[in-house]
Amino acid sequence: MTTTKAGPMLEIDRVAKRYGGTLAVAEVSFTIGKGEFIALMGPSGCGKTTTLRMIAGLDTPSEGEIRLWGRRINEDAPWERDAPLVWQNYALFPFLSVVKNVEFGLKQRGVPAAERRKKAMEWMERLGIAGFAERGVDQLSGGQRQRVALARALALEPEMLLLDEPLSALDPHLRVRMQSELVRLHRELGITFVCVTHSHSEAFAMADRVVIMSEGRVQQIGAPREIYRRAANRFVAEFVGGTNLFSGTATRADGGGLRVEGAFGSAIAPLPSDLTLGDGAAVTLVVAADRIDIAPTRSGTGNEIDARVVTLEVVGSSATVFLETAGGVDLRVQRSLHEIENTSLNPGQSVIARWSQDEGYFLPA
Amino acid sequence: MNAALLRRAALLVWTLLVFTFIFAPIVSTIVFSFNADRFPSLPWCGFSLQWYEAVFADASVQRGLVNSLIVAAATSVIATFLGFAAAYVDYRYRFFGKAAYTAIVALPPTVPVVILGVAMLTFEGRIGLSGTLTGVTVGHVVLAAPFAMALVRMRLADLDPDIERAAWNLGATPWSTIVGVVIPFCLPAILASIFLTAAVSFDEFMIAWFVSGVNETLPVRVLAMLQGQVSPRINAIGALVFAVSMTLVVAAQILLGRNSRRSKEPQQ
């Protein structure tokens, strides 16, 4: 235990991992603060799990450094670290009872039998599995195993908990419950959670900050809202979803904005501060689907695009309207159900898609 | 319909014939070991335990039996230990020449036992082990360890590699992971291996015949007796050896059966 704990808790500093000739993780850098809930997110093979395994010590970085409270831990063996992992397949010990599974880590640390039993029971109580203490793990359902895996990791009272796709093996209904339970546990315990997931809805729902990875590289780091409102690049915008990406050509500055024209039509968006776009430069305009309105006729304000309704998808209280612009470009609009209740949206119907000229941002094409 | 029935009947008869052919000698050995008459001929002359009494009274048979039991016990423990170690190395590590390593470990049972016996005799003669029970045990370990490895390896194939990593992740050193996770997981296979390698050793004749010298094991003693005279005592010994071996093998089978049934249970 270090006495001073200033600065970030965990630093991933230009870490790379090579397996033979293939590069699984390339030059990944980010930091994790104490008590943060971080999600590592990306499609399969993006290097997120390898990164998590390097934090746990199950893989050693080929390059770069991992520091815990400023101390290099690259070479620390997994059993010397204090970062228990909740495995995707739970990896419970099949020959041990539930309570023995939960006690396992404490036993390794030499905690006396009576004390570790007491502690294990406390955690099992907390996670609602105390009733299964003496059962074999093969007699439990998936959700119960998940709780055993959590109790087994948390019984060590670590300063950091690692989670590898903790919800992917659960059925959808359980997944939502477990998701809010993880958030609650994180809030109550105040420890750091590092969670790997391929689902942006999970990551965005749970994490304080999200690290989006692709092909071994970090694409963007930020709070869910930041990422959602402004993707750093095309990959992130597409992966996160919920946005429209319009390809076009920058034509001219128009007031405080830049006009872009393409197959989708023509629209104005705020002039980017971090991107110099000359006249005629190819750009991508990103507009969030929930910022677009549907109107029966033109009003002459904001960006207006002629479109045709393709189909309507209603999930619960929100609706996604799929449109096709006059130029044949797909356009998605997301509204709450009651906002479109009085608008008739039959397939084939002509409508106007409208959004404010302050909305939308540019990415290089 | 009738043709199918006929075919099934024919198959049944054929199967029964095959089993009869295989087991008739064993059954006759057991039956005649209880026969009061000195000659193994029908009709049976009445039930008697005299041949068993004679066997147990024969000091050379007793010595042979004790020797066999000592060698079998030592062999089973050593061979299982080595087999487990070999299987674990195969499971845990990836290294250059691994295919060669596993092939060499699995090799001994494929070598004709006569050759193995002669080789053992010449080698052990040089290092002064020939003629001792240690020498016989060494030979039997060489023969039995591959069976132990095969059994443990089969079990390890069902051990998710993440289980070991999970133990490390929870603070267990590699050594305490082997003791606390790998061995408990493999326990059914380890016990089965102890029974099976004991059976291999208990039945083994050729190596023991070459190496044992004056410290004859039971099978060697039996052959010596056969060469002298055919006595119904042989039947009694045969029945006893059969009973011991079958017990060991069946015990191993039960353990392995339970083992695989549990791992085949649905994962939900």
Image (cartoon, rainbow, N blue to C red):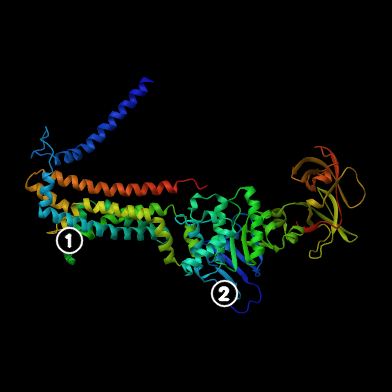
Query: Compared with residue B212, is residue B38 higher up or lower down, i.e. above or below?
Result: above
Query: Compared with residue A160, is residue B47 higher up or lower down, i.e. above or below?
Result: above
Q: Quadrant of residue B67?
A: bottom left
Q: Is residue A277 visible?
A: yes
Question: Which residue is labeled 2 in the image?
Answer: A72
Q: Which chain is disc 2 placed on?
A: A
Q: Is residue B106 visible?
A: no
The amino acid sitting under disc 1 is Thr
Q: Which mark is residue B122?
A: 1
Q: Which mark is residue B209?
A: none
Does label 1 lie on the same chain as label 2? no
Judged from the image, the secondary structure of the residue bearing numbered disc 2 is strand
Quadrant position of the N terminus of chain A in the picture:
bottom right
Q: Residue furthest left?
A: B228
Q: Quadrant of residue B232?
A: top left
Percent position (x, y) of residue B18?
26, 34
Q: Which chain is disc 1 placed on?
A: B
Judged from the image, the secondary structure of the residue bearing numbered disc 1 is helix
Percent position (x, y) of residue A342?
86, 41
The residue lying at 91 percent from left, 60 percent from top is: A255
